[in-house]
Image (cartoon, grey):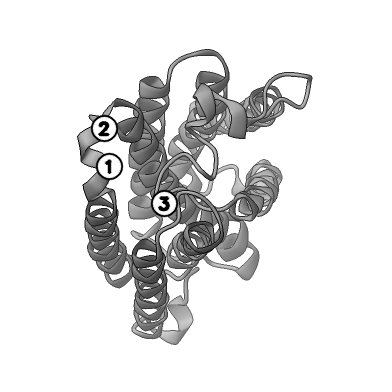
Amino acid sequence: MESRTQDIARQSIIIASATFMLIAAAVGSGAFGGTSVSELQDGALSAQGSYLAPAGPAFSIWSLIYLGLIAYTVWQALPPQRADERQRAVGGWIAASMILNGLWLVTAQFLSLPLTVLVIALLLATLARVIVILGRSRARTWPERIVVDGANGLHFGWVTIATVANTTAWFTQIAPAAWADQAEIWAVAVLAVVLVIGVASALVTRRIAPALATAWGLGWLAVGRLTGEPESTVTAIAAIIVAIVLIAAGVWGVLRRPRADIAL
């Protein structure tokens, strides 16, 4: 009886977390008349906020991530998942990731840029924990692979590049003007770090979804640097190379899994 109560509580907390995330997303994005994200924090979070900011269309991936998380919320609430050991292990962390997701938008709308960096760093760490836990056991069905592994993998991959963009936007605001001459060098150096971390993650987790989401962001980062401000062909080329290598690493990681254990 105690286990059943705890399982129902977990399912309810996830539903509440998803509801908070969606409401916060609506409020934080300015859907109820507030300021849009691109105009928040004096434009620091816009596509022109830094050398590592993706172009505007990149953020359409949020629709897919939210759809996946909503599907997960419904799926995990079904009776067959109530006592599932995999959900018992990961459910609380996914709930925390959805709360932090919504909290970031609220922080961006009403608080300060440094606090958004703190929140998104916590979100990234939480999602990394989700991916680690999911890696300890395999999904039993394709619906589980899509709504659990796939949705959270996309969330993790996108937040990886979003953390880079958010942090760089903050540094751009506080860095001395003299550093502007080395901005491209720093941008390429950061992309090199993304490459190392992304390839290591793809090969260790053997998942394709995180690599695809990060590569999506990098692709639009390249578009932003080639067609918008600040313009930087060097940064764009570096972003394209990193994106291609990440996808290749993700595919290689998946191919190394046993056929019965294919994961997103």
**Mark 1 → mark 3, Cα distance in angstroms:** 22 Å
Q: Is residue 1 visible?
A: no
Please give the name of the residue rendered at 37% of the width and 30% of the height, measured from the top-left corner: 117
Position in image of residue 43 (x %, y %): 53, 30
Left or right of residue 229, residue 69 in this image: right
Left or right of residue 71, residue 223 in this image: left
User: Circles 2 and 1: CB distance less than 8 Å?
Assistant: yes
Disc 3 or 2, which lies upstream in sequence? 3
Q: Alpha-carbon neighbours of circle 2 within 10 Å: few (<14), some, or many (≥20)? A: few
Residue for badge 1: 180
Of the residues shown, which amino acid type is indicated by label 2? Answer: Ala
Question: Considering only vertical position in the picture, is 236 above or below 251?
Answer: above
Residue 250 quadrant: bottom left
**Of helix, strand and loop, which one carries label 1?**
helix
Q: Is residue 101 visible?
A: yes
Of the residues shown, which amino acid type is indicated by label 1? Answer: Ala
Residue for badge 3: 161
Please give the name of the residue rendered at 61% of the width and 56% of the height, measured from the top-left corner: 147
Position in image of residue 204 (x %, y %): 27, 67
Which numbered marker is on residue 177?
A: 2
**Quadrant of the snapshot with the N terminus:** top right
